[in-house]
Every structure is written in structure tokens, then in C-alpha cells.
């Protein structure tokens, strides 16, 4: 099984997820600037989720560069990751429309957490399928370990102050925005 | 005619089908956990259909690996398969919103059955176009024969207990989740 | 400019058009078989448009096989074709919801006509850009000349009996379903 | 990092944006020609945005031809561009539904301006990443400097006469429709 179609399919799904989210930003009702005000939190939620899908696309890209052949386990681990990410548009819209409510913010965090877990499972599947190089590159994997903790904190904080939860989620995004140079450097070192 | 564009187009359509289904999961109305309860069966239907599209994508991938050149017949057999799969989002939403009704569950099964028949037609078209290797690989094709029977049972069971029908549909998915190693093994043996 | 991205982009747009149309098939309201009856004509319109997009994708595929390099004119002629095809989902839904009305059927025919004209313009642009081979292959181009006549007849018939118009549109589809062997044969002869 | 996936992902997102916009052209309510009248300005807005996405796709295509390797900065600059373009469907629908209102027209112009700025940032990122060739090709970059001025004028004119603003936006589109031969010529000269 070659990895070309896996990448193409994943790119397609991620491209659709990132674009479909914008459909939940309903066309403003009214023709004045006031009509945009109620969209403020939906817009912010859209920005955060857009960045998240971008991060996943970027890291997915890096991850698959270390793979030569795709096994059945990798393919299903990949679909599993896409499944949780496919729920982002719905939970983004829910959280965006209820910025001060606890549950939408908590469920948003749970979906992010499950996507992160799915990403780790995919990483494992690749390492088990002969990705010794990847195993070395990742090493201590501080980011990979820190993110779930921050998501869980976010879920908890949702019931205290939802905006604190959003801050935790945004913090994870910032941490990941710094590109994963470990893999890039390791690949360069080998090349 | 080369197969690259056929694969790309099919991947595109399947990626859109799998993502568009999530649009039928409407944003929950309300900000408490109760707002998620009415979505329970729609969510389960989404999961099942997501897995089905994943299975079709996976097997489509395997099937086309045995092809070198694409004939007009293969192209239309492929579009015919995509046609029935394109109806999945609508019937998934219908069945998901009426979990205890007979007809939505039966129609869901009929669409799955027609997609399975379309898949068999595509397989035939490939074998006729010189896919002798594929013919050998498939051999007795137990799964391919069992699935339609289970779909028909599911359609029948819809009128007894819809959840029994869902069980039958889920059973087919589980059978297919076990990857189609026949083709993988045969390809490896030849390689 | 290489043609790979032009094909990929066109495939993407066509894949989305073909899938987005299904979103206009609203989820049936009600849980009995009766709930499907009002969808009958919308479903037939969906089938017809699905076949049309399939035909365009197929012929687009053939057409571009004769191209090596893409000029600016080809690129814009291609976008022009995609523009009219992008309107298919809306006019399909309109015609499908008003099966006995004259205007929706006539406008549907006009969009088909404009797409056909755009296709001819794209063909010209390719021939002008050094597609001498294509010019020979197409020859008398009976189909290409017949289709616009049938579309115009369909538009006219919409005001007599809409179903006669649909028949004319379906007839064009049938004519084109017979694959365009001229190009295939000519390519084979050269190869 | 190779540029293949960056192109594929961008093509996917642009293909979806261009197609999703048509979903905002609601199916006409009514079966007479009158039912199309209220869609007039929404249709014109759709045409303008369609052309804009086509222009961005075309120039994006040219721009990336000068790149060999993709850095993290290029990837995020690219996503940043896609972000602003992803808002086009919403602002197109808003402006299309309120053709005589100042704010929708102004916000439409602001989004176009931000997309243009994002494009310039992407250009810079490519030049900084060793795109000396691109720097030469672009040279004085009259178009790139003129466009923002016209967008800003458009935003201002929205509060005088919205149709004057639309004219300014359409003018930028016309300027860009003339293909960017600088890069084509420079590439040909080097080849």
C-alpha cells in the first residue's frame, strides 16, 4: 500500500473540515456593523479551530514523511484521527454560540483531547510498523505529553470560567505553532 | 486513460461524503449536556456511516492497485458506486433522526445493498478488463457474498426491530474492518 | 505551467459539485415511505445532474490528455466551464422542487447550454494552443453540434410540457454516455 | 518538506471555497422568473468572488512554481492566506443580500484587502526562503502595490455609493485577470 492516496485522502478531509466550519458562521442578519457583534465569539472559535486543523495538517505532513509503506493499522489509526477532527465544525459552532456556557466549552476540550489521543495512537502505529527513526526523533516528546494535561485542565476550567478553558486550548495551539523541528532536523541530519 | 485521476476524483468524492455527513449533525440547541441527548442516535448513525465510507475507501484503494489502465466501463462502474455512496449522508440523517422507525432503517439498508452491488460490478469490470490477477486474488470471496445476505436480513429486520437491523449493518462493517489481506498477500507474493 | 494542478483543481471542484448536490436532497420529513414521495422529482433531477457532472468529468479527462502545457487562456476557459457547472446544484434543486413548472426547467436547460458552450470554448483554446492532434480527432464533432440544438429545444419545450424538456436533456446525456472513443482511438493510433 | 502536499491542500481548500459559495445562492422560492430577481445581486457578488478565487488560485500556482522547498514560515503564511479567503463565502453572501448597504460592501473590501496583504506576506516568505529568482521576477510589482490602494478606496466608497465600491473591487479583478506574465516570461527565459 503506498502512502500517496492516504495523504491525498487526509488532505481532502482536512481541507473540507477547515472550509466547512465557515458554513457555521451564518450570514449576518442585518446590514449594519451591529449585525457582526453577535458573531464575535463564533468568529473567535472559528479562528481557534482553523489554527488547530492547520496544526494537525502540518504535523500529519511531518509524521507521514517518516513512513514509506502504509499498513492497515496505520490506515485505520489515520481514519480514527480524522473522525475526531471531523467533529470539530459541530463543537466549534456549539462553543461559539454559547461562549459563556460550561458544557460546550468542556465538550470542545474533550474532542480536542480525543483527537490528540488519536494522534498519539497513529504515531505508535507508525513506530510499530518499522518507524524506528521516528521513535528516536520524537524522544522525550514534551509537547505530546503536555497537551493532554492542558486539555484536561481546560475541560475542568470550563465549569469555573469558560474563558479560562479557551485560554488553555489556545495555549496548546501556541505551543504547537512552534513547528516540530525535531523531525525536520532529524530528517536533515540523515539526508 | 490513466488511473491517477480516477483515484483522485474518487478520493475527493469520498472525502466530501465523509465530511458532509457531519453537517447533518446539527449544532445542539441549548447549552447543557441535555442538548446532546437527542443527538445520540444521529451520532451513532454517523459513526456507522463514517466507518462504512472508510471501508469503501480502503477497499477501493486495494481494488485499484490491481489496475493499470482504466476503461470507460470501469470509469462508469466507479461513478455508479460513488452515486449510491453519495446518498449515504441523506439516509444516515434520516435513520439517525428516526431510530425507532422501520422505513428509514430499511432504506438505509437498501442503499448499503446497492452500494455493495455497485462494488461487485466495479470488481467485474476490472476483471473483464484484464484483471486476471484480481480474479485469482479474490477467489471464493466469502465476504463479498455474505454482505448482501446480511443487508437483506437487515432490511427485513427493520420491520421487526430496527435495532436488530442496525446490528446486522454493524456486523457487516466489523467483517470488513478486518482488512482484505487476500489482495495484499497476493500482491506481496508477486512482488 | 503544468497541467497537473489544473486537473487536480478541476477534479476537486467537480467532486464537490457532484457531492454538494446531495445536500439539496433534504432529509425526508416523516418516518414512513410516504415521506420519500415528495422527493421523487428532486431525486430524478439529482440523478440527471449527477450523470451530467460524470460526463463532463470524463470528457474533461479525455480533453486534457491531449494537452501538454497549459496557457492562461486554457486556464480561464476551464474556470469558465467550472463556473456554469457550479450553478448546477442550485438549478437542479429548483427544477427538482418544481417539476411541473416551465421556468425552472428552462433555466436548467440554459445552464446546460452555457456549460456546453464553455466546453466548446475550452476545446478551441486547447486547439489554438497547439492542439492540432485534438482538432483532427474531433473531426466533424456531431455530438458537439447536436447537443446545443437539443438544449435549445429543451428550453423551448419547457413552456409546452416540462417533462418533454427533461426528456431532451436526458437524451443529450444518453448520447454522451457513449464514451468519446474518437480521442481514445486517435491516442491509441498514435501510441 | 516538499511542496506537493502544500499545493494539493491549497487546491482543495480553494476548490471547496469556490464551490461552497454557491450554497449561499439559496434555491429560488417560487416557480416563475420573478423568483430569480431577488437573487440578482447575490448572483453578481458570486460571480465577482468566483473570479477572485480563480485569480488567487492562478497566482498561487505561479508563485509556488518558483519554490522548491517549503519552510514552516511559508506553510503558515499560506494558511494565513487561506484563512482570509475562507471568509469570502460569508462576506459574499452578506454583501450580495444587502447590495445597497454600506457595511457589507466595506467588510467585503476589508477581507479582500487582508487576503491581498496575506498574499504579499506569502511572497515575502518565499523570497526570504531563497526565492531570489522570484524577487527579480516581481520587480516593481505595480499590480501588487495598486490593489491595496483600490481596496481601501472601495472600503471608503462603500459609505458614499456601494456600487462605486463594487466597481473598485471589480477593477482590481480586471487588472489581475491579465495573467502575471512576468513570472511566466522569467521562467521561460531561465528554461
Image (tube, coloured by chain):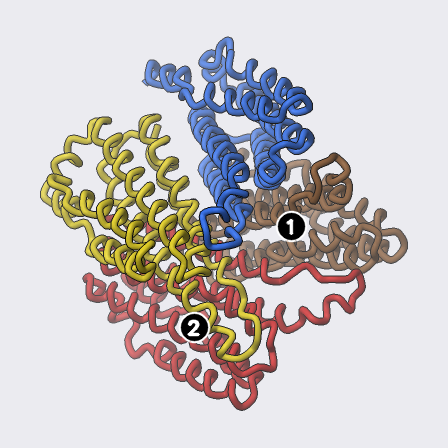
Chain colours: A yellow, B blue, C brown, D red
* Figure check: C141 above or below D164: above
Residue located at (78% from left, 69% from top): D34
Quadrant of the image occupied by residue C172: top right
Quadrant of the image occupied by residue B166: top right
Instruction: Measure how far apart labels 1 and 2 are at the Cα level.
Output: 29 Å
* Figure check: B186 above or below C49: above
Residue at the spot of label 2 = D111
* Figure check: C141 above or below C103: above
Quadrant position of the C terminus of chain B in the picture:
top left
Give x and y (percent) for residue C185: 58, 35
* Figure check: B140 above or below B173: above
Residue at the spot of label 1 = C24
Q: Is residue B149 left or right of residue A168?
A: right
Give x and y (percent) for residue C6: 46, 52
Q: Is residue C169 left or right of residue B160?
A: right
**Chain for numbered disc 1:** C
User: What mark, if any, has residue C81 been given in the picture?
Assistant: none
Residue lying at the far right of the rendered structure: C160
**Chain for numbered disc 2:** D
Residue located at (16% from left, 50% from top): A181
Asked whether the viewer can see residue A16, the reply is no
Residue located at (23% from left, 60% from top): D73
Residue lying at the far left of the rendered structure: A189
Amino acid at each position: 500500500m503506498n502512502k500517496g492516496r492516504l495523504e491525498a485522502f487526509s488532505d481532502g478531509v482536512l481541507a473540507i473540515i477547515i472550509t466547512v466550519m465557515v458554513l457555521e458562521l451564518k450570514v449576518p442578519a442585518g446590514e449594519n456593523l451591529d449585525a457582526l457583534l453577535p458573531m464575535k465569539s463564533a468568529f473567535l472559535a472559528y479562528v481557534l479551530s482553523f489554527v488547530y486543523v492547520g496544526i494537525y495538517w502540518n504535523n500529519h505532513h511531518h509524521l507521514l514523511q517518516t513512513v514509506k509503506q502504509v499498513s492497515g493499522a496505520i490506515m485505520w489509526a489515520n481514519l480514527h484521527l480524522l473522525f475526531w477532527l471531523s467533529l470539530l465544525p459541530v463543537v466549534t459552532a456549539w462553543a461559539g454560540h454559547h461562549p459563556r456556557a460550561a458544557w460546550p466549552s468542556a465538550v470542545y476540550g474533550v474532542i480536542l483531547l480525543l483527537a490528540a489521543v488519536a494522534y498519539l495512537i497513529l504515531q505508535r502505529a507508525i513506530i510499530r510498523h518499522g518507524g524506528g527513526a521516528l521513535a528516536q526523533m520524537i524522544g522525550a516528546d514534551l509537547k505530546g505529553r503536555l497537551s493532554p494535561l492542558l486539555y484536561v485542565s481546560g475541560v475542568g476550567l470550563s465549569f469555573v470560567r469558560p474563558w479560562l478553558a479557551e485560554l488553555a486550548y489556545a495555549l496548546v495551539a501556541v505551543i504547537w505553532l512552534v513547528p516540530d523541528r525535531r523531525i525536520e532536523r532529524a530528517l536533515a541530519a540523515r539526508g
